[in-house]
Amino acid sequence: MTRRLIPFYREMDKNNPGFTLFLDKNSGRVYKAYHKKVNQLIYWIAFALVLALLRSIQSLNLPAGTPLALSILLLLELTISFFTGYRLYKSYYFKNLKEVFFDQTRLQEYIISGKRMLKIDLIATVSSFVVFVLSLVLFLFTYWIIWYLLSFLMLVLTAYMLCSFSRDRFKLYKHK
């Protein structure tokens, strides 16, 4: 039997990596996934390298000679970004999944307080999608590679965030 995990509560803290709680729709079991702690040195090195790369390619325009070439480029962007976002989500949450046990009262408290997180997730997902659409439109007008890379990044982020939404998650909060 496959697990249908619904994320229903997330706790974030500056000093601790935090965790996300998942409810298995089929069995009713609760799982906890601890968030990975980001290595700050690697983060800043990657940030500097990305800035250097962007500065070096900022004057490049993508040649989109025909509508067919542009369509293939956009289709590749959609496919690769959705796959990347999905894989990032799965690797971030589902490698360190551990079953936890709560009494019914504590579980209900987590579900109720997780409803606020759903609203925040929806706002963030819609915002990243709007930035994706704007950057894609700007790319289509200018063919500037920076807009294309930004639209790709925002679509990866949108796909990553969409993985946490399911009909079951909305039903869970609807009844509480």
Image (spheres, rainbow, N blue to C red):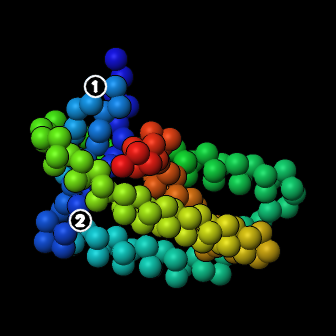
How crowded is the residue under tag 2: few (<14 C-alpha within 10 Å), some, or many (20+)?
A: few
Number of dots carrying numbers: 2
Give residue 91's quadrant in the image.
top left
Q: Of marks 1 and 2, which one's residue comes earlier in the chain?
A: 2
- Badge number at residue 12: 2
**Is 74 positioned to the left or the right of 120 in the image?**
right
Q: Position of residue 118 (x, y in %)?
A: 41, 58
The residue to which callout 1 is attached is 27
Q: As displayed, is residue 62 above or below residue 52? A: above
117 to the left or right of 54: left
Mark 1 secondary-structure assignment = loop
**Residue 168 relative to residue 151: left or right:** left
Vertically, is 13 above or below 36?
A: below
Of circles 1 and 2, the one toward us is 1
Of 63 and 5, the residue lying toward us: 5
Instruction: Residue 18 in the image: state x and y as whole percent.
Output: 19, 60
Residue at the (52%, 77%) spot, across then down = 54
Q: Secondary structure at mark 2?
A: loop
Tell me the residue at 56%/59% (across/down): 155
> Label 2 is placed on what type of residue?
Met
